[in-house]
Each structure stands twice: as structure tokens, then as C-alpha cells.
Amino acid sequence: MAVFAALIAALGLPGALVIGGGAVPITFQTLGVMLAGAILGARKGFLSVLLLIALVAAGLPLLSGGRGGLGVFVGPSVGYLLGWLLGVLVIGWATARLLPRYRILPALLWTALGGIVAVYLVGIPMFAAITGTPIVAAATASLVFLPGDLIKVVITVLVAKGVHRAWPGLIAPRPWPWKREERVTASA
């Protein structure tokens, strides 16, 4: 878990790309968050991201651009940081259900739901509230992140596919909730 927290921090070293003077930077760190869920699973991935966020809160400059400290948590990007926690849970939860096969198309869908939709669901409203921007305007402004985030989804799925092929059993496969009756019937 600490290794993934370090990976996410290292992905911030190249810095951030700020488009159009935006308050929320585009970073590679979201790729690390997606990879944590897709490779470690929900629990370990969540703990990795939580560790990174705790280290940032403690003042370590681990976010892109060398940002760290409690000030980060009152800035416009705090919702996206907290959204990482929801995103990694969604990706990890789904990955356990996609295994052992880990088919590309379902993995792309679930990684996009966790790595983009879940993060934006937390990030956009908090950005709007902190900056005083109308929610529709904040959502529209967030569209600039979408192409890069979609590329990160593809990279995550391809890397995770290779990792799960090389190390099967890294995440214990779990049944989908609507298929629980098969497991109950089989164990009865």
C-alpha cells in the first residue's frame, strides 16, 4: 500500500498542467489512483490513497507542483482529492468482480465510472461551492479534463490486464451482487 502511495506521489513530480488559468490542475496522479484500485483492489487501494492524503495533510509536498499541507483541503481541488477515495473504491470493487478474466471493455467501463464519474461527482460540486461557480459552469469547465482522463482509463486497464495475467489471485475474485444466489446455492 505504501508503494502505491509513493507511486501516486511520484506521478505528481512531472508537475501539473493548468489549462486556461484553471484552479484545478491536470496531473498524472489520477492515473496512480486508478491503478491502485485496478491492481490492489478496493480495500488496499483505498488505504493507499488515504495514506497519500494523510501525508499531504501532514504537510508533505506530495501533490503535483509540490503542494501539501492543510491549505490544500480548503482549496478548489479538495473535492477531486476526496473523490479519489470514492473512485478507487469503485474501481477496486468492480475489478474483483471482473476477475479472473478481466475483459477489456467491462474494465474500461468500470474504470471510467470510478476514475472519472465518481471523482467528478465529488469534485465538481465542491469546486463549485468553494469558488462560487454555478454547478453547471463548473461541470462544463471540467470537460477539459475528460480527454486526458479517458487516456488514463485506457492505460490503467491495459496495465491492470497485464498485471492480473502475470499475477493471478492478486485480488480475490468476487461475485456480482446479482449473482449471489449461485454462490449460496453452490455452498448449500
Image (cartoon, rainbow, N blue to C red):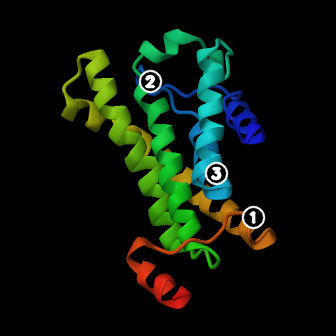
Per the image, label 3 sits on a secondary structure element best described as helix
Q: Which residue is at 64% across, 11% downward?
A: 59
Question: Which amino acid, by three-letter code, is at mark 1?
Answer: Val
Give SS at disc 2.
helix
Q: Which mark is residue 163?
A: 1
Please name whichever residue, 71 or 112, is drawn nearer the observer in this view of the structure: 71
* Res 38 → quadrant: bottom right
**At 67% from the left edge and 54% from the top edge, which residue is drawn?**
40
Most foreground residue, 11 or 14: 11
Name the residue at 58% across, 66% down. Answer: 96
Using the image as rendered, state which of residue 146 and residue 7 is in the foreground. 7
Which residue does the numbered mark 2 point to in the structure image? 78
Could you tell me the amino acid type at mark 2?
A: Val
Indicate which disc residue 26 carries.
Answer: none
Say what amino acid the circle numbered 3 marks.
Answer: Leu
What residue did someone put label 3 on?
Answer: 35
x and y percentages locating residue 37 in the rendered image: 59, 52
Residue at the right extreme? 166
Mark earlier in primary sequence (3, 1): 3
Badge 3 density bin: few <14, some 14–19, many ≥20, Cα 10 Å: many
Against 136, is 103 above or below?
Answer: below
Q: Say few, some or many: other residues with alpha carbon within 10 Å of mark 2 (under 14 / 14 to 19 / 20 or more).
A: many
Q: Quadrant of the N terminus?
A: top right
Report the side of 126 relative to 136 (left or right).
right
Q: Looking at the image, which residue is at 62% across and 20% down? A: 56
Q: Secondary structure at mark 1?
A: helix
Q: Find residue 47 and report its horizontal and vertical position in percent.
A: 63, 40
Q: Earlier in the sequence, mark 1 or mark 2?
A: 2
- Give above or below for 40 relative to 68: below
Residue 30: image location, x then y, percent: 56, 40
Kindly check if marks 3 and 2 are in contact, taking CB atoms under 8 A apart as contact.
no
**Residue 147 in view, yes or no:** no
